[in-house]
Image (cartoon, rainbow, N blue to C red):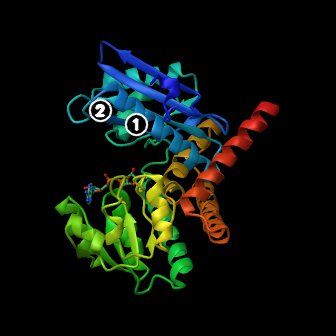
Amino acid sequence: MTLFDSPAFEGHEGVHAFSDEKTGLKCIIAVHSTARGPAAGGCRMWPFPSAEAALEDALRLSRAMSYKNAMADLELGGGKAVIIGDSHTQKTPALFEAFGRAIEDVGGKYWTAEDVGVSPADLMHARKTTRYVAGLTGHSAASGDPSPVTAEGVFRGVVLGVRRALNRDLDGITVAIQGVGHVGAHLAEKLSAAGAKLIITDVNENALRQVAARTGAKIVAPHAIFDADAEVFAPCALGGAINADTLPHLKAKVIAGGANNQLADPEIGRAVYDRGMLYLPDYVINGGGIINVAGEIRALDRQEAFDPAWVEMKLAHLMETLGEVLDRSNSEHRATHEVANEMAKARIRLAAEQKAAA
Ligand code: NAD
């Protein structure tokens, strides 16, 4: 199969591969769509077993960013960068400067930010050779850590989901959180403050102890989280938490968490719907982080300071969009992820048509 026949490539505007012998940089920048604006999405550094695996990841993630940015109503398209390498042993300032030059070569069609294996400090090096970098700290346009905003959006999504599915507020509701890292820990504190009871798990004992001390959460082993007696399951660790093995164990009526790619495949989303569970599509409920990053891109473009009020306005609007997804799922008797995908594609199509007509 050639790249152009690959299902992952479908709909992409471009894929750019770069290597730099001096620094060892090998990276792929995938631009799925610029219909709504320049493509934006983080950069992941990972020891991919092959260039094909890196390409597949870049393509899958860039399309997801198009959908996420469209549902967050941002004037941004979708893109993603992957650097092939071990972030623990192969990072150097020179490598990220070379990465910045690669971004610069894409000519402003792609803005980068942090993702797995890439920190704000790494991005500061990329910033020396390109301006298309967001998610930084230390300047007036900087948006800082996006995780608290992501967690705030997920928290509001949980409130919405519980109201819709159970006609209750959070007081006395039990939420099972898988992963108490950046997003999960903030989410746990917000839920606890709203009166929810928590069951948490993580592979990081230290993170677990800290969150439990602050929230009174009950700790369970990683495999036991799927059997937790909880009304809400909040995946906040890695992708694929909802799959054919885990779904039969879940007792929750609502699935609402921060992780990307929660559904192992689209069919499992249909199975969730058929079981009468309410799934809040991941790339909609977790859009707070990219809204925060978009606030920085906006501030840089306008040469203004970062505006938290704009971020709050966009986050509130995102929650209305989430409500619309749930309304349509209800009235059209369709799974929420199917409704969200259709809405995202329609928004991107409309922007492309408007751009072509302009
Ligand atoms: P993180 O690395 O800080 O936290 C993830 C946590 O999951 C870690 O504490 C890790 O130990 C834990 N974990 C890993 N494997 C596990 C397992 N098998 N069982 C239980 N716990 C496990 O990452 P984060 O920034 O909190 O992001 C969490 C998820 O949310 C990711 O899927 C990320 O892509 C997504 N996301 C994050 C943001 C953001 O603003 N940080 C925005 C959108 C989406």
Q: Please state which of residues 138 and 58 is positioned toward the viewer in this rendering.
A: 58
Q: Is residue 89 visible?
A: yes
Residue 196 lies, in percent from the top left, at: 39, 81
Left or right of 230: which side holds 331?
A: right
Q: Which amino acid type corresponds to the residue marked 2 in the rendered image?
A: Phe
Left or right of 306: which side holds 125?
A: left
Q: Which residue: 41% across, 28% down?
A: 126
Q: Which amino acid type corresponds to the residue marked 1 in the rendered image?
A: Asp
Residue 31 lies, in percent from the top left, at: 54, 31
Counting other residues with Cα less than 10 Å from the Cα at mark 1, is it few (<14), some (14-19), or many (20 or more)?
A: some
**Which residue bears the numbered disc 2?**
48
Mark 1 residue element: helix
Q: Which quarter of the rendered picture does the N terminus lie within?
A: top left
Q: Please state which of residues 342 and 172 is positioned toward the viewer in this rendering.
A: 342
Say if mark 2 contacts mark 1, CB within 8 Å: yes
Q: CA distance from mark 2 to mark 1?
A: 9 Å
Residue 57: mark in rendering: 1
Q: Please state which of residues 25 and 17 is positioned toward the viewer in this rendering.
A: 17
